[in-house]
Amino acid sequence: MNILVVNDDGYQAEGLAILVKALAPFGNVYVSAPKTHQSAKSHAITIKNRIETFVSVPIFGSTATLVVDGTPSDAVRLGLKVFDIDFDLVVSGINYGANIAKDIMYSGTVAAAFEAKILGIDAIAMSAPNTNLPYLYDETIKLFDELIETKLYEYDGILNINFPKETYQRPKGVKITTQGLRLQHAEFVKSEKPDIFHIKGSIINYQEHPESDVVAFDDGYVSITPLKLDRTDYSKIKDILETEN
């Protein structure tokens, strides 16, 4: 397999190094990652400025590493362009911090996987509450043993994978989940200086479906949530058409 690895924490992130090392036994691994931290950039792309790139010393386990002075989605596009290889899979991560529930709307990690899918390549996003978790490397290999054998990622969406709360020494297992409701609310608060604001974060919890990624995360399971590009509300279309008739 030819695998492109991207992330939003930057090319020097520990989670990226763990992922590359874990994927190396499965094929030829190439890396295209942002030069600097790009968390919460969602699906932004650079359209008004030039983007600088440079080839770095390959991250251990990779064939080549490209550093992109842009967003995670830029890194996907430029990785595909510069390497000019027929990639079988794009894997984004391992992000430092979970991307569950409404977090996915802001996540550069998830957006990079979606960008790959837009460009016609199967993709997986991976996140963990902490990339220092002692089990992370072994569990990532175990996951990909199963994922590549079953080709679960081969469909018209992406897989969003999250490791559980760091209070667990090792995941209890794997669950296929729905996207949860929890919101990490970010409120702009005025600082002591006039016209200057900073963000104060808080978590808003809702009554979660028992099969949601939030419940799996809290209960010690790896969650795999299939996500689709198509955001059309087909039930609403049906309701409108039935009302008109």
Image: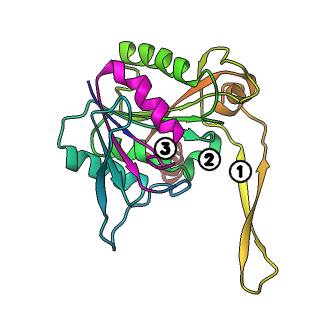
Would you identify the image quadrant in which residue 206 lies?
top right
Pick whichever of labels 1 and 2 is earlier in the sequence. 2
Taking the spot 54% from the left edge, 40% from the top edge, the residue there is: 95
Secondary structure of the residue carrying tag 3 is helix
Taking the spot 72% from the left edge, 85% from the top edge, the residue there is: 195
Which amino acid type is marked by label 1?
A: Gln
Which amino acid type is marked by label 2?
A: Asp
Write down the residue under mark 1: 184
Q: Classify residue 92 as left or right of residue 48.
A: right
Which amino acid type is marked by label 3?
A: Val
Where residue 207 sits: x, y (%)? Answer: 78, 37
Write down the residue under mark 2: 103
- Badges 1 and 2: C-beta atoms under 8 Å apart? yes
Would you identify the image quadrant in which residue 46 lies?
bottom left
Q: Residues within 10 Å of mark 1 (few under 14, many from 20)?
A: some
Q: Classify residue 151 as left or right of residue 236.
A: left
In the orientation shown, which residue stands out farthest toward the front?
57
Taking the spot 66% from the left edge, 21% from the top edge, the residue there is: 221
Q: CA distance from mark 1 to mark 2?
A: 7 Å
Q: CA distance from mark 3 to mark 1?
A: 16 Å
Pick whichever of labels 3 and 1 is earlier in the sequence. 3
Q: CA distance from mark 3 to mark 2?
A: 9 Å
Q: Is residue 134 visible?
A: yes
Would you identify the image quadrant in which residue 170 lies?
top right
Write down the residue under mark 3: 110
Where residue 82 sits: x, y (%)? Answer: 21, 49
Q: Classify residue 204 as left or right of residue 71.
A: right
Where residue 75 sits: x, y (%)? Answer: 35, 51
Where residue 57 sits: x, y (%)? Answer: 33, 43
Pick whichever of labels 3 and 2 is earlier in the sequence. 2
Q: Looking at the picture, does residue 230 appear above or below residue 192? A: above
Which residues are the magenta region?
6-35
